Image (cartoon, rainbow, N blue to C red):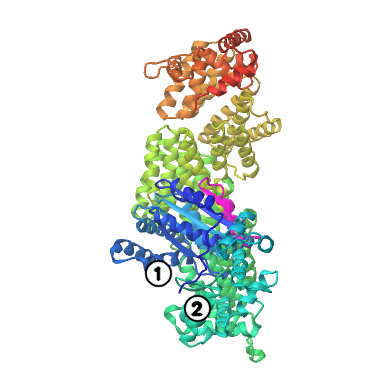
């Protein structure tokens, strides 16, 4: 059934077509992801552009899947992806049997998925793996229309896929109606987070300009427009292509007398339809698009021949388009115009017909649509079971946001009086407490913490529905998840004080409270509560999980505060307990916290790495490879990084990434990989990982704030962005609520280093307020660390030594302080900070023009370590300092000066007349430094610099520093 809907030429979009082709295909390499979100007002041509781009990408060899989101707030989870896969499968021929098998296998994944809060990440992984099989090494492009109506599960899938954890080459092109993203629309937050990724673009599709508006109208009319007609089309359309097409067709067809509003244009078009076609358009406007032909027949109750004729007329009048799955309005603006044209009773009749038709065909039953239609038909009693069924279906597919909306709708429906019933029977007979429990729990799982707590209060008001102790425990869980630690702690304590609390509930509350206190860094309180939990658990048969959880808190507390050996003994006993019981998650938790304790506060790195890797193997045997094995391998990676085994750490990361982790597990691994990337100087890789972490943590993640910001600061300093490093550290100091002195001391070191680097480079002024604040934090860390166990103090003391040394750089770097830092890190067998400290000690000695031989030795030692690690930025800084000081670094038998001389052969002829030292001076001159500042940088006198500058002027035949700088900039390599 053809129409002229898409016969109008695509005008004024050539630049956008080229941009989209490049962003989605040409610039995307294997294993990379990209996305373009196309925004714009209704009618601006987003859908048409999506279709044109999809066709061109297919022609270029990409596999393109197209889907659209449903215009109902409680849509089925992952609907656009399911629709895209079904469409693609329907188009496959017998020659594509392998691809069809992969598509149907992925569809089967959705059909067989079982619910549960812990399975959502697994579903995302299986979907990603299934798409990889479908793509068969071809670039995959997912094209989604009407993303403003996207369901929560699809939003989470997009975040997961675009984080780029696997080797799937994926591009996403999605259209969003700009006017829909108002207020607290959930998609606004997703787009804000995704904008951080360099591979994600948001492209605003503007209306056509005056020239393209006239060109489009001329093409449709078939002749040049007169001045008055062209002006009328431009003024009335505002460049909106859809309106331009409508007005131009009116001109072409000789239709006069239309009003100046788009509403009147649409209403006139509908009024011109035959009566059956009029009914069809109204029915589609009321339905959930796309409306299948059989369903439209039930809603309109037209005979088949008459229905077909009516649809043809609506298509010919450009009000309907034929979709693969049924019929859609030419534009949703039509539905908005028609919304007030039907009487409420007429709309209710259409909704009832849709609902009855869906109910009568179980094979085609979609519970979300059914609940939608019964509700708007004024039948709450029949909408409620459908809403509950839709909620359970959403939970089965881990669509907790959608499930929560359905449970909330069910609660509202349960409160609607049934018309025609007696006063005693007017409300639907339903277990309201059960609805509240489900609504609260799904709100908790989908991150709607305030809503979960509000629903829990309603549940508490239902007398006798839930025991008080269970309510307190659940409330504490919700509060903790919401980041409200203090009231969560209070709720756990209330649970323990409730008289009807069972022994098992007391053990559960105490163990979780101990873990919460440990998470907050209140190690003494955590230890006390853990002991109480162990006493309670001892009286409850089968309370292994509570014993393991409490023992982890107790062991960590004792090891951090008092006796590392005693703490380790408790942890190892917990591991033995878990192994004897055989519950996989208990075993995994015990290995996890034991490895964290060894590689973190206790700094027993080698043993910690061994425990982490052994634990990873064990939990893989227990079937927890994707979650706990990934986290244990991340811990092993961090340990290997600290002891300087970076190459081995890379192998461990590669092994862990094969699990394609998600959520917190992915964050742990990405942060571990980012540490390596920062050390290696792989700026782009580090940037990608940090952006991916920020994306995954869009809904929270306070545990990872300090490590994330510390890495961001380190990366910014290697990029020379000391202001950004300062901002990251200050944010961490402000937002952190952790009392873990080790990670806080590392953050403060990065902050003081940023100020010292700013002072040395003179790129940004030193922030005296920031320095004062960092001094205060340093003093606080020093005081608190005095109460920690000796191994913990040792680690903190190493960072405090770095902090003191960095402070000395602000007023003349002190070699003695740097020597103390070298000794601290050498004793702890951390080669990277030791090498960095040697570099700074040498720099301080050279600045004082003393002990040059010692400085040279320190630089060579630091350079040897940096080269062995592969620490490119550190190696580069060492070479730069050695070059200025004329210190020879042996590198493949060549000195730094020899290396520079060899590299200079490629310099331009204009600079070839200069010596190596003169080029160094000219580089500093071009930066705007004075002779005194250049002398301080190169460790030679101001007078000698003046001589070099005179020689440069003579050789380059210039008279001013500006002229010399211009020649340098003109001939600068790269």
Q: Earlier in the sequence, mark 1 or mark 2?
A: 1
Q: Is residue 205 magenta?
A: yes
- The residue positioned 55% from the left and 42% from the top of the image is 708
Q: Is label 1 in contact with label 2 (beta carbons under 8 Å)? A: no
Image height of 291 relative to 474, above or below: below
In percent of the image, x 59 and y 55: which residue is there?
A: 205
Against 78, is 612 above or below? above
Q: Name the spot of residue 795 as percent of width and height, x first.
A: 52, 33
Mark 2 secondary-structure assignment: helix
Q: Is residue 285 visible?
A: yes
Q: Foreground: 5 or 200?
A: 5
Check residue 667 for magenta coloring. no
Highlighted magenta segment, given as a residue range: 180-206
| Residue drawn at (49%, 68%) of the image | 395
Which of the 4 image quarters holds residue 468?
bottom right
Q: Position of residue 889 (x, y in %)?
A: 44, 17
- Where does the image place residue 194, in percent across and percent down from the top left? 55, 51
The one nearer the camera, 887 or 79, is: 79
Q: CA distance from mark 1 to mark 2?
A: 36 Å
* Label at residue 569: none
Report crowding for label 2: few under 14, some 14 to 19, many 20 or more residues within 10 A (C-alpha): some
Q: Residues within 10 Å of mark 1 (few under 14, many from 20)?
A: few
At a point 47% along the width and 45% down the height, the residue shown is 670
Q: Is residue 865 above or below residue 693?
A: above
Q: Nearer the viewer, mark 1 or mark 2?
A: 2
All told, the count of numbered labels is: 2
Write down the residue under mark 1: 111
Residue 358 appears in the rendering: no
> Residue 222, image x and y in percent?
56, 64
Q: State the residue position of label 2.
A: 312
């Amino acid at each position: 059934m053809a129409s002229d809907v898409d016969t109008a030429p695509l005008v004024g979009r050539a630049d956008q077509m080229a941009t989209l082709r490049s962003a989605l295909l040409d610039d995307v390499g294997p294993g990379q992801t990209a996305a373009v979100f196309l925004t714009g007002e209704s009618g601006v041509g987003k859908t048409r552009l999506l279709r044109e781009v999809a066709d061109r990408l297919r022609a270029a060899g990409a596999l393109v899947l197209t889907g659209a989101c449903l215009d109902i707030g409680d849509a089925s989870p992952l609907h656009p992806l399911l629709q895209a896969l079904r469409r693609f499968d329907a188009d496959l021929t017998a020659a594509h049997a392998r691809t069809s098998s992969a598509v149907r296998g992925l569809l089967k994944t959705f059909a067989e998925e079982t619910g549960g809060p812990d399975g959502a990440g697994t579903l995302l992984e299986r979907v990603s793996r299934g798409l990889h099989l479908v793509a068969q090494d071809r670039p995959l492009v997912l094209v989604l229309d009407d993303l403003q109506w996207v369901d929560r599960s699809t939003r989470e899938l997009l975040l997961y896929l675009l984080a780029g954890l696997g080797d799937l080459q994926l591009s996403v092109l999605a259209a969003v109606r700009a006017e829909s993203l108002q207020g607290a629309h959930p998609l606004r937050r997703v787009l804000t987070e995704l904008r951080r990724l360099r591979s994600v673009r948001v492209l605003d599709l503007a209306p056509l300009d005056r020239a393209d508006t006239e060109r489009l109208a001329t093409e449709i009319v078939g002749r040049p427009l007169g001045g008055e007609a062209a002006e009328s089309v431009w003024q009335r359309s505002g460049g909106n292509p859809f309106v331009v097409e409508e007005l131009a067709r009116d001109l072409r067809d000789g239709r006069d007398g239309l009003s100046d509003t788009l509403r009147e244009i649409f209403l006139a078009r509908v009024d011109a339809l035959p009566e059956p076609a009029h009914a069809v358009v109204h029915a589609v406007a009321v339905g959930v698009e796309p409306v299948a032909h059989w369903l439209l027949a039930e809603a309109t109750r037209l005979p088949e021949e008459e229905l077909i004729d009516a649809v043809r007329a609506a298509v010919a009048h450009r009000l309907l388009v034929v979709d693969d799955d049924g019929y859609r309005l030419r534009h949703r603006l039509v539905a908005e115009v028609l919304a007030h044209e039907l009487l409420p009773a007429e709309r209710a009749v259409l909704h009832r017909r849709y609902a009855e038709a869906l109910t009568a065909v179980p094979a085609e039953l979609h519970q979300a649509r059914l609940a939608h239609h019964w509700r708007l038909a004024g039948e709450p009693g029949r909408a409620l079971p459908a809403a509950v069924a839709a909620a359970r279906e959403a939970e089965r597919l881990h669509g907790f946001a959608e499930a929560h909306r359905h449970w909330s709708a069910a609660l509202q429906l349960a409160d609607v009086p049934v018309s025609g019933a007696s006063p005693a029977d007017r409300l639907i007979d339903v277990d309201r407490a059960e609805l509240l429990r489900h609504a609260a729990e799904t709100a908790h799982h989908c991150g709607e913490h305030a809503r979960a707590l509000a629903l829990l209060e309603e549940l508490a008001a239902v007398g006798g529905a839930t025991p008080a102790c269970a309510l307190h425990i659940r409330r504490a869980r919700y509060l903790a998840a919401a980041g409200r630690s203090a009231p969560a702690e209070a709720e756990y304590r209330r649970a323990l004080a409730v008289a009807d609390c069972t022994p098992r509930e007391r053990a559960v509350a105490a163990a979780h409270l101990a873990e919460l206190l440990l998470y907050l860094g209140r190690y003494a309180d955590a230890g006390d509560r853990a002991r109480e939990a162990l006493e309670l658990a001892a009286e409850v048969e089968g309370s292994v999980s509570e014993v393991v959880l409490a023992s982890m808190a107790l062991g960590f507390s004792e090891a951090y505060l008092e006796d590392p050996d005693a703490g380790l003994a408790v942890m190892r006993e917990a591991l033995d307990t878990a192994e004897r019981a055989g519950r996989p998650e208990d075993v995994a938790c015990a290995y996890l916290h034991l490895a964290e304790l060894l590689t973190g506060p206790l700094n027993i790195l080698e043993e910690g790495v061994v425990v982490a890797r052994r634990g990873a193997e064990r939990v893989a045997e227990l079937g927890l490879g994707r979650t706990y094995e990934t986290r244990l391998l991340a811990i092993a990676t961090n340990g290997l990084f600290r002891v300087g085994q970076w190459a081995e750490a890379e192998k461990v990361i590669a092994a862990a990434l094969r699990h394609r982790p998600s959520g917190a597990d992915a964050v742990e691994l990405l942060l571990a990989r980012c540490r390596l990337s920062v050390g290696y100087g792989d700026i782009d890789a580090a940037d990608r990982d940090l952006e991916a972490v920020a994306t995954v943590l869009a809904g929270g993640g306070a545990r990872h704030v300090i490590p994330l910001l510390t890495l961001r600061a380190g990366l910014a300093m290697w990029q020379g962005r000391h202001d950004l490093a300062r901002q990251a550290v200050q944010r961490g100091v402000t937002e952190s609520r952790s009392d873990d002195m080790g990670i806080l001391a590392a953050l403060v070191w990065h902050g003081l280093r940023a100020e010292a680097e700013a002072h040395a480079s003179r790129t940004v002024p030193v922030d005296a307020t920031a320095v004062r604040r960092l001094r205060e934090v340093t003093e606080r860390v020093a005081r608190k660390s005095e109460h920690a166990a000796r191994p913990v103090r040792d680690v903190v003391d190493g960072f405090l030594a770095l902090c003191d040394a960095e402070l000395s750089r602000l007023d003349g770097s002190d070699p003695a302080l740097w020597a103390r830092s070298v000794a601290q890190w050498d004793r702890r067998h951390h080669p990277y900070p030791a090498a960095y400290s040697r570099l700074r000690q040498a720099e301080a000695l050279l600045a004082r023009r003393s002990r040059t031989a010692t400085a040279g030795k320190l630089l060579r030692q630091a350079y040897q370590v940096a080269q062995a690690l592969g620490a490119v930025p550190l190696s580069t800084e060492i070479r730069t300092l050695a070059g200025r000081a004329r210190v020879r670094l042996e590198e493949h038998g060549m000195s730094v000066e020899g290396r520079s001389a060899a590299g200079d052969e490629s310099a331009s002829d204009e600079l070839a007349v200069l010596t190596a030292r003169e080029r160094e001076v000219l580089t500093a001159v071009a930066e705007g430094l004075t002779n005194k500042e250049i002398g301080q940088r190169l460790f030679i006198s101001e007078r000698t610099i003046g001589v070099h500058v005179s020689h440069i002027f003579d050789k380059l035949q210039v008279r001013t520093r500006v002229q010399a700088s211009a020649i340098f900039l003109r001939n600068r390599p790269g």
